[in-house]
Each structure stands twice: as C-alpha cells, then as structure tokens.
Image (cartoon, rainbow, N blue to C red):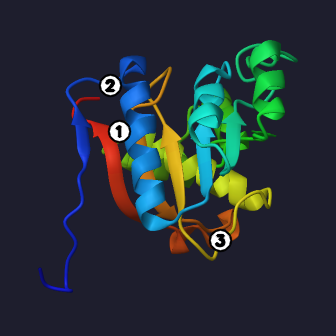
Amino acid sequence: MSDAYRKVETIYFDRPGAENTDETLKHALKRAQELGIKDVVVASTTGETGLKACKIFKEFNVIVVRHHTGFRKPGAQEMRREFEEEIKNLGGKILTASHALSGIERSIRNKLGTVGMLTIIAETLRLFSEGVKVCVEITVMAADAGLIPVDREVIAIAGTSRGADTALVIKPSHSNDFFNLTIKEIIAKPREK
C-alpha cells in the first residue's frame, strides 16, 4: 500500500436514528484506539447516549454536550438528573452552552424570519446529515469551553433527534477560528436524512 493514502472503514447506516447508537459507539471507540485519540465529544439531550459513551470510553476525556437550559421550555433542562449524576460519577464532563451554530441567531430567525450566516453553515453541514452538523457544533462548543484541546484530533459523536448515528474524527478549533476546523474522517453516518 502506498504511503499516499489510507484504507479506513466507514459505516453507513440505511436509516438515521437511535437504533444505530451501539454500533456508532463501537466503531468510534475502535477508531479512537487505532488513532490514539483520547478526547471524545458526544451530544446527548436526555443523557442516555452520554452515559453509554462514558461506559464505553473508559479512561478517555469524555465531554457530554447537552442542550442549553430553556431550549424547549423556559428554565427547563432536558437532561435527566439520574443520567447527569451517573455521567459525572463515571468521570464524564457535562457542557451546557448556547449552540455554536445558532444561539441568538435562532431567536432572530424566529422573530424576524431572516436567515443569517450561521444558519447557512448549519444547513450546509446538514447536507451530509444532522449528525455531521451536530458533531461540528459540539466540537466548537467544547473547544470554546476549554474542555478539549485544539492541537490534536478528537472524536465527535451525535445523531438525528435521539441516540447516535454519526461519528467523525475532527481537528477542533474555537468559534473565532471556525474555518480552521477540519473534518478528518467519517467513521459512521446515515445514508438517508
């Protein structure tokens, strides 16, 4: 085999959804071990997927990124308290922050019906899948919070609505340096939206 390329397995699920969670996590762990990656960022609304990731990625720096408080209902946090406690007990870190690819721009869109640049970036990433968009977003959020390094690759895991169906290898960047972020590899993603 030439040094000019690598042959790496990518998993493509027929459909998006939570039923792909276990396979996504399994393949993400395998690739992290192959590459020597020690930092994992995972999206989790209720905490169920984040807890599964913490159980699988033992001795990794696991960052569980949840929705910001008030995302669905003013003042309410969607992550279940029992999952939150168990994630922390297993050494996982929980990040609660405004979404990097929407934040206040979502409020402007909802109030005024206008589309901003962040929406265009988010919709472009959704051309690959919802999970690709979320993986990029949570990686930026974790980098901005100082919870992952920006000088080495990380694994990002997300999904479509619930669970996990997408995993990427990403070289992170902060939001003020967004266009230096690099999606290095697709480990898994759904073929359909």
Spatial separation of the CA atoms under disc 2 and disc 3: 29 Å
How packed mark 3 is, by other alpha carbons closer than 10 Å (few <14, some 14-19, many 20 or more), is some
The disc at residue 129 is 1
Spatial separation of the CA atoms under disc 1 and disc 3: 24 Å
Name the amino acid type tagged 1.
Answer: Ser
| Percent of width and height locating residue 23 | 36, 31
Residue indicated by mark 3: 150
Query: Where the N terminus falls, by quadrant?
Result: bottom left
Residue indicated by mark 2: 16
Marks 1 and 3: which is nearer the front? 3
Quarter occupied by residue 113: top right
Q: Secondary structure at mark 3?
A: loop
Quarter occupied by residue 44: top right
| Percent of width and height locating residue 85 | 84, 23
Q: Secondary structure at mark 2?
A: loop
Q: Is residue 8 left or right of residue 157?
A: left
How packed mark 2 is, by other alpha carbons closer than 10 Å (few <14, some 14-19, many 20 or more), is many
In depth, the one of 90 and 189 nearer the eye is 90
